[in-house]
Image: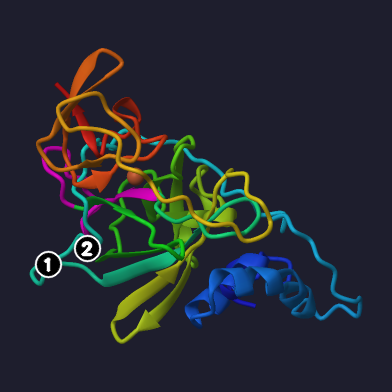
Amino acid sequence: MDRNIESETGGAGHVTRKAVLRAALAAGLTAPAVLMGVPALARTLTGSEEAPALTPTCDDGDDPTPPQMEGPYFKPNSPRRTSLVDASTPGTRLTVSGYVFGLACRPVAGALLDFWQADVNGAYDNTGFRFRGHQFTDASGAFRLSTIVPGLYPGRTRHIHVKVQAPGRPVLTTQLYFPGEPRNNTDSLFDPRLLMTVRDAGGAKEAAFDFVLNVPQDPGPSPTPTPTPTGTPGGTWAAGATYRPGDSVTYGGRGYACLQAHTAQAGWEPPNAPALWRLL
Ligand SMILES: [Fe+2]
């Protein structure tokens, strides 16, 4: 079994519920239908003779996604964008796609993902924002990043940094790794639980990874609350308010300027969301 397959199946020869969920979501099934069928599907795919049992929690043994150190190269205020490349960017094209799940294996919509990585030469842009960008998961909890395969730099194996934050929850800081990299065996930070699945796609690479956040969820479907705008740009920050770049608010007695258009949510208070707010 190669390492790609190993990571996809949790390394124990069984297909994880996350993998089943991702396949079902990618097939266009609605989330509630997917989630109701997932435990039985996952058990079916283990090859076990046991009758399927309903297990409502995301307890594959590889959840939630483990944290890793931020390292020295994170910068706040990254641009909101899903592509870190343009036509002239050197390097092997790479897409990273997947889903953000909570503890009940239900997708988390509107989760903030802030990626940063080295360029093809293994260098980070510490003066500008090359190879830095944040985005939000869509209604199905999906994200997609267009970038390049990051270059190597001394002391580390190949990796991509990311911060992931569900609305109203703490930030998960972690790193994603590539299978089959020689330095995976010598980098003390490397964690096989953070291996992406990577496949070749016509000279490019397509990678997948699903995050599981420490987000309590009811196992059954529930309606997503619709934010009700209550705030006024220029006034006090308020969850549910829509802000545009340049809007200023006060929060905790301090002033902040909006960097990216967004609808505010609990957990994205200005001090907690450096990609969205700059302290004045
Ligand atoms: Fe790094």
In the rendered view of the protein, which quadrant contains the N terminus?
A: bottom right
In the rendered view of the protein, which quadrant contains the C terminus?
A: top left
Answer few, some or many: residues within 10 Å of disc 1's Cα (few below 14, many 20 plus, some between 14 and 19). few
Front position in the image: 88 or 169: 169
In this view, the residue farthest toward the right is 50
Q: Nearer the viewer, mark 2 or mark 1?
A: 2
Residue name at image x 57 percent, y 78 percent: 24
Is disc 2 in contact with disc 1, using a CB cutoff of under 8 Å? yes
Residue name at image x 41 percent, y 51 percent: 226
Q: Position of residue 179 (x, y in %)?
A: 49, 66
Left-right relation of 182 to 203: right
Asked whether mark 1 and ligand 1 are closer than 8 Å, the reply comes as: no
Marking on residue 215 = none
Left-right relation of 250 to 153: left
| Amino acid found under the numbered disc labelled 1 | Asp
Q: CA distance from mark 2 to mark 1?
A: 8 Å
Q: Position of residue 10 (x, y in %)?
A: 66, 64
Q: Mark 2 sits on what residue? A: 83
| Amino acid found under the numbered disc labelled 2 | Ser
Report if residue 127 lies within the magenta region.
yes
Q: Quadrant of residue 46?
A: bottom right
Q: Is residue 224 above or below residue 17?
A: above
Figure quarter occupied by ligand 1 = top left
Q: Quadrant of residue 244?
A: top left
Report if residue 81 lies within the magenta region.
no
Q: Which secondary structure lies at badge 2? A: loop
Answer few, some or many: residues within 10 Å of disc 2's Cα (few below 14, many 20 plus, some between 14 and 19). some
